[in-house]
Amino acid sequence: MLIVGIDPHPGQHAVALVEKSSKLRKLHVFPNTRQGQKAFLNWLKTHKVNALAVEGPTQPFFRSWAARLLELGYPLFPIPSQEVRLLRRVRARGKEDKTDAWLVARAYLNAPQAFPPLALPEWLLPLP
């Protein structure tokens, strides 16, 4: 089982590929641009990912990415920032985007049943 943790920001999105055991496989940063989104989707295709855990997936600077990922059938799980802060405090480390991406995935793995998947609102769904 592979989980992608995403810590989105206006300029770039930090991404961590994490195993079920919470072992970190890869860290990456993608620019928050169309080219960055395309690169991320290509990167995502090279891994057999079971879920994407995202801190704040409905933020304006990540909304288009979330819509595209849902449209492509990727399950997105919103992770509250409080969960990430708690894990950061337990690990006694400062804030760092790549580390936070890993912590987002770990928060999901600690209690996947606690985070319902994100769904597109009806008004954003494409017409049949």
Image (cartoon, helix red, strand yellow):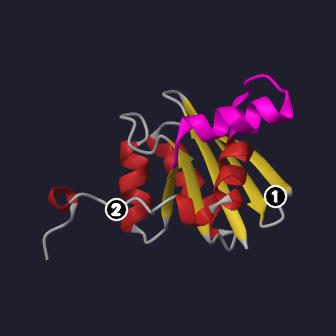
For the N terminus, which image quadrant?
Answer: bottom right
Residue at image position (40%, 59%) is: 118
Q: What is the spatial separation of the Cα atoms under label 2 and label 1, in whole angstroms? A: 25 Å
Kindly report the secondary structure that dominates the magenta region of the rendered protein.
helix
Residue 31 can be seen, yes or no:
no
Residue at image position (45%, 63%) is: 117
Give the percent coordinates (x, y) of residue 107: 67, 50
Q: Which mark is residue 119?
A: 2
Residue at image position (40%, 36%) is: 59
User: To which residue does mark 1 refer?
Assistant: 22
Magenta region: which residues?
A: 79-100
Which amino acid, by three-letter code, is at mark 1? Ser
Give the percent coordinates (x, y) of residue 49: 65, 70
Residue 53 colored in magenta in the image: no
Quarter where residue 112 is shown: bottom right
Give the percent coordinates (x, y) of residue 88: 75, 33
Tell me: 55 left or right of 2.
Answer: left
Q: For label 2, count other residues whose C-alpha is less than 10 Å away and answer few (under 14), some (14-19) or many (20+).
A: some
Give the percent coordinates (x, y) of residue 94: 78, 22
Q: In terms of secondary structure, where does tag 1 sit? A: loop
